[in-house]
Image: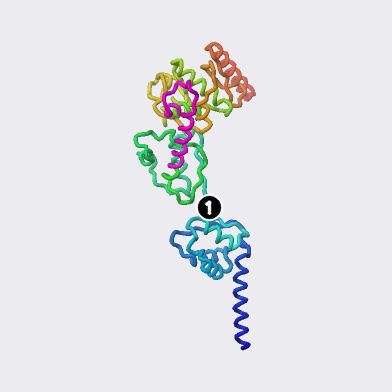
Amino acid sequence: MVVCLLLLGAAAAVVWLGVRSLDEPSRLAAPVRFKIAPGMSFARVAAEMAVQGVIANPRAWVVYARLHHLAPAVKAGEYEIQPGTTPRELLTKMVNGQVLLHSFTIVDGWRVQDMLAALRRNPDVIATLTDNAPNLMGKLGSPGVDPEGQFLPETYRFIGGTADIELLRQAHAALSKELDSAWMNRDPDLPLRNAQELLIMASIVQKESGLPQELGLIAGLYLHRLSIGMRLQADPTVIYGLGDEYDGDIHTVDLRTDGPYNTYTRAGLPPTPIALAGAAVIHATAHPEKTDAIYFVASPKGDGSHVFSATLQEHNAAVASYVAHQRRKAGDRSQ
């Protein structure tokens, strides 16, 4: 009889300790990442977490999960376990599928090749695309569309192991939504025929913009040039057309050499966007500031702003002022 009571007492103590262990904070010194593969048994999850010091009493944890029918509900994925997390809290997190989310940022003004290179460098993204990604838009359901400009610069959150094409699908859908909205709500007198032309113009503004407060004015200037039949004369389009031949400077021969992206030799818009335009730039291009200015040059302030002029005489004076300022700066540095 005494032996039975002792056994029962020992069993009760084991159960009590097991239940108590479910609410004991982990003693991790730093966050730990743990991946649960699809089909992985909960017993194996518990055993591996015990090896990593996440769970102190894996057997009690498994028994509790099975008794409450929670073990089959655990979601596969990557989890980040913070110091102090209790086993009960961790189980709830895994049942709810609160997996670790990674981020990938598409930067305003990137070209598609910049974006693809960044995707290939991201260790949490599964690479499925080749360097040049031929037929990229075909894989996204838009065959025949040039991929340049077709992705919205933004930070995207994703589960580790997501394929690159899936991230691009999100970014393209986000661009389509933003562009469609901007086109539907555009100013009625824009000298543009469709949403694609809006995107092309926005990409030029994106590459020319130095300050957010100038976006609308730069957009207004280029649209004014377009409306009066003036060539856009946009350096960024020439640079884009040069591709790998661009050496950091635009030379006179570059401006005179005709090509589809040379807006000095050809009227109208280039055939495709030249960069990935952000939402703010698309909106500014759809709602530009009204201006008579058709020229602009960097301001002597050196803060990224510009001086805008409506006449060539004003523009030449602004250019002379900028050149004089640069020469004074060069002289100060040489002393």
* 190 is within the stretch colored magenta: yes
Q: Residue at x 48, y 34 (%)?
A: 178
Q: Residue at x 48, y 56 (%)?
A: 77
Is residue 134 visible in this depiction of the protein? no
Q: Which residues are magenta?
A: 169-198
Residue 4 vs 138, above or below: the answer is: below
Quarter of the rendering containing residue 148: top left
Residue 103 vs 61, above or below: the answer is: above
Q: Residue at x 48, y 51 (%)?
A: 160
Q: Residue at x 41, y 44 (%)?
A: 165
Residue 90 coordinates in the image, percent (x, y): 57, 60
**Viewer-proximal residue, 330 or 103?**
103
Looking at the rendered structure, the kind of residue marked 1 is: Leu
- In the rendered structure, the answer to whether residue 114 lies left or right of residue 58 reads left
Residue 307 coordinates in the image, percent (x, y): 58, 19
Which is the main secondary structure of the residues drawn in magenta? helix
SS type, badge 1: loop
Locate the N terminus by quadrant. Answer: bottom right
Residue 102 vs 84, above or below: the answer is: above
Residue at the spot of label 1: 100
Residue 94 coordinates in the image, percent (x, y): 53, 58
* 69 is within the stretch colored magenta: no
Q: Give the number of callouts.
A: 1
The residue furthest bottom is 1
Say few, some or many: other residues with alpha carbon within 10 Å of mark 1 (under 14 / 14 to 19 / 20 or more): some
